[in-house]
Amino acid sequence: MSSLLGASSLQQNVIAEMLTELESSGSFHSLQQAVANEKERKANFYNVITREENGRKKIKSLQKQIQEVKQEKELEMQSRSELIAHLKDQVQEMKAKTSIEGKYVKKDTDLMISQTQRKCGIAEAELQTELQRVKEKVDEEIRVHIEIENFLRQHQQELEQKLEYWMEKYDKDTEEKQAELNSLKASRAHDLALLQEMATKCKDFEKVIIEDRLEKEKAQRQKIQEMKELTSVIKLQAWWRGMMVRRGLGSYKKTKSKSGKEKGKKGKAKKGGKKK
């Protein structure tokens, strides 16, 4: 269960990293790296299988050694049995020679036989115990090997399914992102053309604005000039009128009345040129 959760978390991390990379740089190197890592894990899995095969060969070698030890012990037991038989023969011969020596030798031989049999029994029991322990260990190793082999086979199938899923997803995502990229390129080309058209219009508008501004400035300068000229004309007329009045020229010429006082003519003559 933990391995499945770890694999799910790993898939989410790979997808998140791939989406981040696609949004930032438009590439998917992280997904390629994840596929490479998965291939490396698969290679490690095959290495585990190789080690299991080596362990099986070692078990076979140990079984062979056990068989050799068993044969060696059987030969030793046979040799000891033959020795016992030989000792029995010697005892019988010694009984025939002398009864006293026979009794003594018989007791001694029986004692030796008993000790030898006891030793052989102990050795045989130890060998049987060791053989049983080795058999149990071999059975345990075989059971563990079968469980590991089943687990690895199931894990291999899961990895192959995941690899196939990710390869299909990789191809699908690649096609989708390529189509999206083509759409973005077309949109970008359309936007560039629209931007260029807007820039041309902006230049035309700017040119019209500049011309209109120049015309307004020109009209303003002309209006100021006309005001200056008008002011100058008014000042000039006022100055001339003042000169005419002070000097009594033209319609402002001074005349003498009957009382002997001089009066100036009005600033403006009546129509027809009549005098008062």
Image: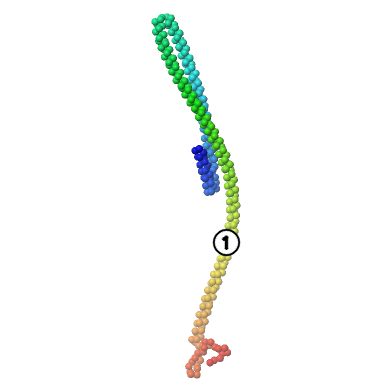
Instruction: Identify the residue at horizontal 49%, vertical 22% (top origin).
Output: 66
Q: Which residue is mark 1?
A: 202
Residue 164, quarter of picture: top right
Q: Is residue 256 above or below residue 238?
A: below
| Front-most of residues 239 and 2 | 2
The residue sitting at the front extreme is 1
182 over 108 or under it: above or below:
below
Q: Residue at x 50, y 82 (%)?
A: 239
| Structural crowding at the residue carrying mark 1, measured as other residues with C-alpha within 10 Å and reported as few (<14), some (14–19) or many (≥20) | few
**Residue in front for this viewpoint, 72 or 241:** 72
Picture quadrant where residue 192 is located: bottom right
| Extreme residue toward the bottom, this view | 258
Q: Left or right of 137: which side holds 193?
A: right
Q: Secondary structure at mark 1?
A: helix
User: Does residue 58 appear in this view?
Assistant: no
Choose between 7 and 72: the one closer to the eye. 7
Work out whether residue 73 can be spotted. yes
Q: Is residue 9 above or below residue 109?
A: below
Residue 104, horizontal then vertical, whole percent: 39, 8
Q: Position of residue 121 (x, y in %)?
A: 44, 17
User: Which residue is rendered at x = 53% and y = 38% of the image?
Assistant: 38
Give, as a three-letter code, the residue at label 1. Answer: Cys
Q: Number of numbered discs present?
A: 1
The spot of residue 19 in percent (x, y) is 53, 46
Residue 130, placed above or below residue 171: above
Colour mapping used in the image: rainbow
Measured as percent of width and height from the top left, residue 44 is found at 52, 35
